[in-house]
Image (cartoon, grey):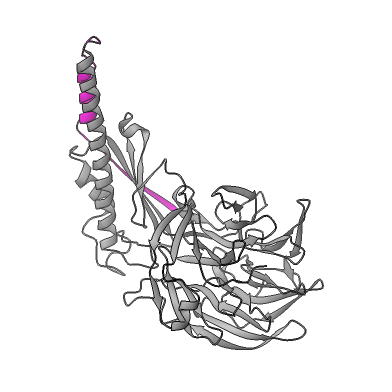
Amino acid sequence: MFENVRYKSTARKIPVFLALLFAFCTIPPAHAQGAAKRNEVVTDAVAESQAAAIASLRTINIAEMTYAVTYMRGYSSTLTALAGSTADPPKYTAAALIDSELGSGVKNGYTFTYTTLVSGGRPSLYTVTAKPVNGAGNGNFYFTDQSGMIRQNNAQPATVQDSGVSKVIRLDPALDDVVPADVHVEVLADLGLTRGSLTEGPVWVRKGGYLLFSDIPANAIDKWTPDGAISVFLTPSGYTGTGPSESKWTHNGRALVHLIGSVATTIDPQGRVVFCAQGDRTIVRLENDGRRTVLADRYEGKRLNSPNDLVYKSDGALYFTDPYSGLQDGDKDPKRELPFAGIFLLKDGKLQVLDKSLKLPNGLVLSPDEKYFYAIDSAKSHIIRYRILPDDTIADGQVFLDVSKEHLTADGTDRGELDGMKVDRLGNVYTSGPDGVWIISPEGKHLGTIVTPTRICNPAFGDSDGKALYLTTHTGELYRVRLKIEGVRP
C-alpha cells in the first residue's frame, strides 16, 4: 500500500570532526594540557556539527511547509507528485535541498536521509533524519516531519510542565463560574515524542485514584498515577489477532500510526473496565480476574465496523457508536460488513440499533440527569441531542451544536474537530473542537474555549474532587486542566 522513497546525501569532503580527531591522535600522551585542549576543540566540533544538522533540518522543513497544501493541522504534502495540480510547484525537491545544503561538505558530521510514504498517489509522510557519522554528536540523531519540530532520538516523555496561565476565549460571563481566571494547561506526558502515539479514551478510576487512557498505535491501555508515573495497564488492548489487522494507518502530524488498539474506555456500574477494541472490532469487558468478555462483535450476524466510544446509563444500559473510521478504506473498505454506521444500545444481552442517520457517529455522552443523549456526527461537525425514553432508546434528535463553519480556517487548515465529550454536574458539555476544549451550556450556547497547544481528542473528568479535566490528543500528549466545577465520572 505504501511506497518508500529514500534519498541520501553525505558530505563529500572529509568531515572537519574526523580531520580534527586524526590530527589530535598524533599528540603524545604526555602532553596533558594539549590533550585537554584537544578535547575542547573536538567537543566544539561536535557541537558545530549538531547545530548544522539541526539548521539543515529546519531549512528543509520550512521549504516543505512553505509550499504545502495543508490537509489537516500538522499535515503537509509538497512533493513533486502534487506540483502543478493541487499546489504551486516547489522550488526544490527535498532531495535537491539536501544536496544543496549538505553536498558541499560545509555542514559535516551527519548523513541525511529523506523518506516519504506515498498512499493512493498522494504523499502522506515525510521524515528527514540526520544521523551522526563516526560518533559525531555522541550518538544522538535528529529528525523532523510534518509537525515542523526538531526532535532527538533519546528524548524522554515530559514530566509535569506548568505552561503558565493559558489562553481562554471567553464568550459568555457564565464561563467565569466554570473556568478560573488563572487556568493552566499542564503537560503531564508527551508519549508522541518517543512512541508516535495517538491517545484517546481517558477515564478516571475512582477505586484506586488513577487515570486510564488508550495509546492506540501501541495497542495498549496505559495507567497514569498522580505521582506522574505511566505504566501499561493492559496489552494488547485493541487487536489480539496474529495476522494483519484491518485497522487504518494514518499520519497524526508526528508519525505514521496504526490505529490498531483500543479507543474509548469506561467503567461499568460494577466497577469493571469496558473498552472499544477497535482492531478486533468488538466491545470488551475486562473481568476482575483478568479474563476478557466480548459484549458485542456482531449485529444480525455481521461484524461491527470499528467501535469508537461508549457510555453506561446508571441502570446498566450500554450505548456505543460504530463508525467506519477505523477501517483502512472507511466506508469503501471491502472488509466492511454492515451497510451503515450506527448508534447502538446493548441492554439485557440484546443489541439494537438506535440511529442509522449519522454518517460518522463518534463521541457520545449522557446528561447528568440521564434525560438527554448527545452524539457527535464527525462527518457534519454536529453534536446531536436526543431525548432518552423510558426503555433507554432515544428519539427526537436535533442539532445541538454546529461547528461546520468553524473547524477550518479560510485557507483550509484544520483547527480541530468534534471528537469526544463529557458533561459536568450542571449539564455543561465539554467537547474537543476548534483550537481546544469547547464548553457548551445545556441550552446549546458556546460559553467559551480553553485553547490547547495541540489538537484534542477526548476529555474526561478526574481527581478526587472531580474538578480536573484530563485531555488526550491527536499527537500523543496528556494534559490536565483544573476547573471550578465537578464533572460527571463513571
Q: Is residue 313 visible?
A: yes
Q: Is residue 448 above or below residue 241?
A: below
Q: Is residue 353 magenta?
A: no
Residue 171: x %, y % from top left: 41, 82
At which x and y percent is residue 68? 30, 64
Which range of residues does the magenta coloring cover?
A: 2-30
Q: Residue at horizontal 25%, vertical 41%?
A: 51
**Residue at image point 47% right, 49% down:** 159
When the figure is inspected, residue 330 is found, relative to residue 254, above or below; the finding is: below
Q: Is residue 311 above or below residue 17?
A: below
Residue 52 spot, x, y in % from top left: 23, 42
Q: Nearer the viewer, residue 446 or 243?
A: 446
Instruction: Identify the image quadrant of residue 65.
Output: bottom left
Visible residue check, residue 123: no
368 on left or right of 360: right
The residue under the point 42% across, 40% down is 154
